[in-house]
Amino acid sequence: MQQFNLKLAFICAVIGMTQSALAQAVCEGEVVFQCATDDADFREQITVCAQDESYHLVRHALETGALYYDTPLVAQASTTWFDWQEGDDLSIELGFWSVDLGEPVTLHARLPWNDMEEAVAMDGEAEMWLQSPHWQQEVNQTFCLSKTVYADTEALWSALGERGPVGLFFSQDVIVPEPGAIDVARVTSQPSAAGLPVYASATPNAATPVWWQLFEGDTVDVIAFEGDFLAVAIPTNGVDTCEISADQLYAPYDGPCATGWVDGAFLERGE
């Protein structure tokens, strides 16, 4: 992945809008993404700022300034969900965890892409929306007006400078595979219809991010354990297998799979 920059002018007045919207910093740090929602009856502004090694998402009503989230959404760049896909267009996903809602809130951006130049194209339509949760078929989506999308992908990278290997994504705890822990397990049950949460920590609480869900019948690779929780490796971004090789033992796991923690009571090992 390379660093590219797109700054699409944020339109101050859009047809049908009753309130002007300016590209302004409403959170601390440098503005990375900003847009206005497409609900003409209740227009909101979504802003993402990068500061140090984290991202902050603010969503507020343009007319009154009222905040949508009581607790600000913060994403630690080193462990949060992040995806960058280049094709006919550039697709970016950046994950936040809502303490109030107890679920992920993922910002999606689709920007025009020039594959020959390997750069964001300066013409073409841009899209942006919030989606939660991102692993279920039925999702809650909040779409932005295309002409109000502002994206500065160069500012996106400053916070990602300390991002570790793929295998450390999701897990906020360092995972060290050992022979006695490595196994394949099957999900025998799930605590709710939403699935079995894969936590970012082996000691989860209400504020612990859940970036993945497993479902009854799924099989997963176990690579470590801590108390009642098992560290699992999850294939993402086209990875087919999470099998541990001998040279990956006794050292912090660094991929290629993402990692997280699952309550072992819902898994049957030795599958």
Image (cartoon, rainbow, N blue to C red):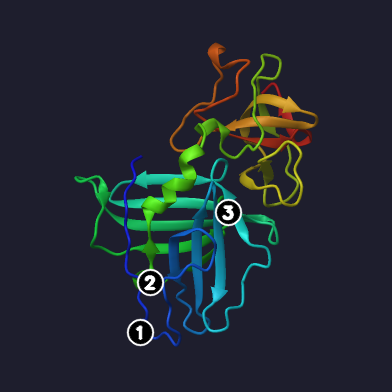
Going from N to C along the chain, the mark reached first, 3 or 2, is: 3
Badges 1 and 3: C-beta atoms under 8 Å apart? no
Tell me the tag on residue 15. Answer: 1
Q: Position of residue 17 (x, y in %)?
A: 42, 84
Left or right for 110, reference 81: left
Left or right for 244, reference 265: left
Q: Residue at x 49, y 28 (%)?
A: 256
Which element carries disc 2, helix, strand or loop?
A: helix
Which element carries disc 3, helix, strand or loop?
A: strand
Tell me the tag on residue 96. Answer: 3
* Residue type, mark 1 in image: Ile
Say few, some or many: other residues with alpha carbon within 10 Å of mark 3 (under 14 / 14 to 19 / 20 or more): many
Residue position marked by numbered label 2 in the rendering: 148
Going from N to C along the chain, the mark reached first, 2 or 1, is: 1
Q: Residue at x 73, y 26 (%)?
A: 225
Which element carries disc 1, helix, strand or loop?
A: loop
As measured in the structure, the alpha-carbon distance from the residue carrying label 3 to the one carrying label 2 is 22 Å
Badges 2 and 1: C-beta atoms under 8 Å apart? no
Q: Residue at x 56, y 19 (%)?
A: 244
As measured in the structure, the alpha-carbon distance from the residue carrying label 2 to the one carrying label 1 is 11 Å
